[in-house]
Image: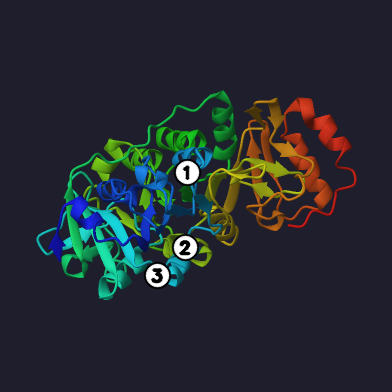
Amino acid sequence: MKTLSAAEAAALVRDVDTLAVPLGPGQPSAFLHALGERDDWRDLSVFAALLVEFYPLFTRKGVKLLSGFFGPVERALRAGGQEVHFIPADFRRFALLARRMAPRVVGTVAAPPDGEGRLSLSLHAGATVGELHRCGRDPNRLLVVEANRNFPRTMGLPPEHPHALHVDEVDVLIESDGPVVTLPEVPPDEVEKHIAEHARAYITDGCTLQTGIGGVPNMIARMLADGPGGDYGIHTEMMTDGLMHLHLAGKVTNRKGVHDGYSVATFAMGSRALYDWLEGNEAVRFLPVDQTNDPSVIARNRRMISINGALSVDVVGQVVADRISEREHSGIGGHEDFVTGAAFSDGGRSLICLPSTANTPQGRVSRLVSRFPLGTCVTTPRHQVDVVITEYGAAELAGKTAGDRAKAIIAIAHPAVREALLARSDDLPPIPG
């Protein structure tokens, strides 16, 4: 292992090369910024997802970003005419794709090494764990680890999932102390509060919870933390402030049937308080995404309740969660993994939550529609969907006919559009799902 500056490490990347870095909080920021100082790229392909900073690297001629999940940075780069491409795949599938792509250079951030030379992978396990180890073993590849003293040391479930690299595996170590990206907790608005109240009715004592990002999931977690009941388990893709508050309220026992005694996640994003709470916290364990998002593992949890968002739903129950019109907005992520896993959990339910309307440049439009435009990419097909929730109530779809599904969806649409939706739904079009 060599300890180098970020600029020295960046110089080891060839002008024609392939590089992979993890999603979001696993990205080696100093290394990526140092790569952006170079302007001699001929053909550099970078595999990433959910960039957490605006890295100048992706504005350089000869650099191509291949992203599995868009956030504000990817959308801004695309709008600026940069070469940004979306790779359609669910989150757990990227573990397989990373192995197939086998980029020559793999980089990640980690906490500094402990006394035994272990570098905790901190806030991200995700889809890159296996590829980090494979890269470290291959003398023809380059493993770059940025050890940042501001990242918490978190745990996995050893021996199979240690959630750490050893310094002996690492080719280049960069020491840094840059700030950790934080995600402000945005207070829910009135619509989100109503959605959370409807969703809360599906959560009973002893449920296992998966929540995502946003006002609705955080509101639900707060309601559970402040209210009666408990004995909850946590098996989630993302560890959030809301789930931390549920722990701090003493409501989490994790008697859930799989990974008992531990809350499991594959990455974390939130406040600095969340990161400080995760430091050395034995109650929370980080596992690779092909473990956390495996529907067969999810289904083993006791009364699994999956809570996810959506952009639009049609009257047969198809869900669009990652595209607006013909433009990629975010990504597929673990949406369908948890919808599927919760459905096969004993007593489990899958909740798709969304406001009934959206504000657009053309005015307010309904998110619940009679049919999607031709060419729409569906994120989750109708046969997977259990419950859809808006501020007007919950539509239970599983086991219902197409006609009954339409009536249930229309009943939770904005009152101003229900009559029009009903008029167009008497003869449902044959939409492939």
Instruction: Let me know if residue 253 appears in the view.
Output: no
Which is nearer the N-term, disc 1 or disc 3?
1
Query: Where is residue 417 shown, x and y percent of the image?
Result: 78, 29
Q: Tell me the distance, in whole angstroms, between the alpha carbons under discs 1 and 3.
A: 23 Å
Query: Where is residue 360 shown, x and y percent of the image?
Result: 65, 28
The quadrant of the picture occupied by the C terminus is bottom right
Q: Which residue is mark 1?
A: 74
Q: Tell me the distance, in whole angstroms, between the alpha carbons under discs 1 and 2.
A: 18 Å
Query: Where is residue 353 shown, x and y percent of the image?
Result: 60, 40
How would you rate the neighbour count of disc 3 (Cα within 10 Å): few for under 14, some for 14-19, many for 20 or more?
Answer: some
How would you rate the neighbour count of disc 1 (Cα within 10 Å): few for under 14, some for 14-19, many for 20 or more?
Answer: many
Vertical arrangement, residue 39 with respect to residue 72, above or below: below
- Residues at badges 1 and 3 in contact (C-beta under 8 Å)? no
Q: Secondary structure at mark 3?
A: loop
Instruction: Let me know if residue 16 appears in the view.
Output: yes
Tag count in the figure?
3
Q: Which residue is mark 3?
A: 102
Closer to the camera in the image, 185 or 53: 53
Residue pictured at 85% horizontal, 36% vertical? 422
How would you rate the neighbour count of disc 2 (Cα within 10 Å): few for under 14, some for 14-19, many for 20 or more?
Answer: many
Residue pictured at 66% horizontal, 57% vertical? 384
Query: Where is residue 291 shown, x and y percent of the image?
Result: 43, 64
Q: Which residue is mark 2?
A: 94
Vertical arrangement, residue 189 with respect to residue 430, above or below: above
Q: Tell me the distance, in whole angstroms, between the alpha carbons under discs 3 and 2.
A: 12 Å
Does residue 192 appear to the left or right of 37 in the view shown? right
